[in-house]
Image (cartoon, helix red, strand yellow):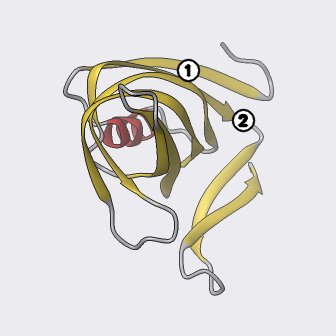
Amino acid sequence: MQNETQKIFALRLRSGDDLKLSIIDFVKQNKLKAGYIITCVGSLQKANLRLANKNEATAFKGKFEIISLVGTLSPGGVHLHLGIAHSNGKSIGGHLMDGCIIYTTAEIVIGEALQLQFARNKDANTGYRELVVKGRE
């Protein structure tokens, strides 16, 4: 679906796919310039998250429901946060890292702002590559 301000995409990942790497591939294949996650449901058999205020990722093994995926998508990189729930209902979330492997499926809806362009530049204050928003030329 497309109107003059946004375009909507939907994709389904399958068992064994890497959630982050698959999204990065989708951004590249579709040449998204200002993408964002609208919704995602599915499950993981392995999760790899960088938790708040940590420098390294933490690996989680088991079966997990995806309860939230949010973030921005650009040619220069993605910034995604993932919330998951264990089989006992307890949830955890953090920065999505490579190595989050789909268990059964992931159904993802992605939007693109057609009047914007996202970039990522190193921010002197944070030390991270942060979002820069521009209008499209």
Foreground residue among 103 and 121? 103
- Residue sitting at 77 percent across and 18 percent down? 3
Amino acid residing under circle 2: Leu
- Residue sitting at 64 percent across and 44 percent down? 34
Foreground residue among 32 and 85? 85
Mark 1 vs 2, N-terminal side: 1
- Residue sitting at 49 percent across and 58 percent down? 76
Question: Comparing marks 1 and 2, which lies closer to the viewer?
Answer: 1
Residue 71 place in picture, x, y as percent = 59, 45
Residue 103 place in picture, x, y as percent = 25, 23
**On residue 9, which mark appears?**
1
- Kindly give the residue lying farthest to the front in the view shown: 88
Residue 127 place in picture, x, y as percent = 55, 82
Q: Secondary structure at mark 1?
A: strand
Foreground residue among 127 and 137? 127
User: Can you identify the residue that label 2 sits on?
Assistant: 114
Up-down relation of residue 75 to residue 40 (above or below):
below
Q: Secondary structure at mark 2?
A: loop
